[in-house]
Image (cartoon, rainbow, N blue to C red):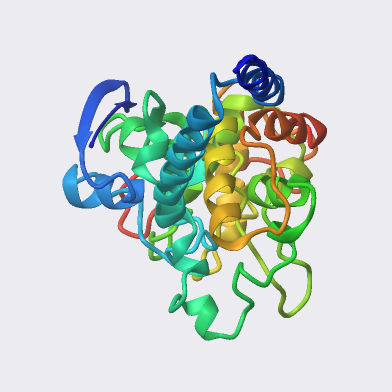
Amino acid sequence: MSINLTLNGAAVRLDADPTTPLLYVLRNDLKLNGAKFGCGLGQCGACTVIVDGQPVFSCLMPLAALEGRRITTVEGLGTAAAPGPVQAAFEAEQAAQCGYCIAGMIMRSQALLERNNRPSEAELRAALSPNLCRCGTHMRILRAVRRAARAMGGGVRDPSEPVGPPRVRSDGRP
Amino acid sequence: MGWGATGLVALVGLALFAYPRSGSPGDEAAGAKDAAARGAVYFAGACAGCHEPGAGMMLEGRPPLSVGSALHEASPDHAIRLILRGIALPPGPAGHYMPPFADDFSDAQVSDLLSYLHARHGGPGAWPADLAPAVAKARKASGG
């Protein structure tokens, strides 16, 4: 069975078992390894991608449901050399510890800020609540999203802390 | 003979009235079978990891869909809401959770999924063959 969809702006035709969750097609067939397998149960958010503007758990998104739909993965937001604003903000805040959750965190943040770049602190926290970070860098992640909101022309309306100067990595790289 | 023809016309007329989206009861049955077949595919990709026998959640002793109430109610509204909104994790040390699928599936796809689930696990009554309007209504009621 073949499915036609738009992936990171390009038309893609996929031939795979239609029951296959999108995550496996992305990682195993298309070698887009940004989205991660965390729990496979829609409980952790490591696999989050954007489908038609909304964040979804790609581990539970059957290919059969994706005909004609528009998918964005973290690879579609920018590159290491030219990161998108949310990616750049996560880097500036050094929001990753092990980094496993970060692609999902970035995608859920991206979806929020595309929809509303002036969220309240409560809206920001509610939007990110489906995604877990086992290292516990949630406070840095929240800082990164506040920074990204500002970079995207808005800003969190009632931030629990102001956007500060970017953090510098211990190895001195930006 | 005249009675037979009249009866047939009345039957077809009734069928058309009862099932405005299809031409005959035979088409309707075939349509329901197709819908359930599509629903089975969605179930395998989205739901089976928790709800199929042998899945981790089942091994932990959670109730199978065949004994849950949502698929046995006279109205599909509760099942529709569960699929769209899931079950939010309550505050506290532990609780039951189901992820929402509102942004995964279209109204027609949710309808197909429910056709499959109701045929496999549900009853005893019948649900409308096309639940897409009810799904759209539930989305609207919950703010999209």
At 65% across and 54% down in the image, what residue appears? A129
Residue nearest the viewer, comparing A9 with A97: A9
Q: Does B8 sit above or below residue B44? A: above
Is A146 or B95 nearer to us in this picture? B95
Relative horizontal placement of residue A16, taking residue B53 as reference (left or right): left
Residue B30 visible in the picture: yes
**Percent from the top left, x then y, of residue A102?**
43, 53
Image height of A81 relative to A104, above or below = above
What residue is rendered at 41% in x and 65% in y? Answer: A38
Dividing the picture into quadrants, the one containing residue A122 is top right
Answer above or below: position of B50 versus A8: below
Q: Where is residue A154 drawn, in percent x and y?
A: 65, 24
Residue A92 appears in the rendering: no
Depth check, front residue: A149 or B11: B11
Residue A55: x, y in percent? Answer: 53, 40
Quadrant of the drawing holding the C terminus of chain B: top right
Residue A95 in the image: state x and y as whole percent: 48, 54
Q: Residue furthest front?
A: B1
In the rendered view, does A22 fall on the left or right side of A118? Answer: left
- Left of A137 or right of it: where is A88? left
Q: For the point 71% across and 20% down, which residue is it? A: B17
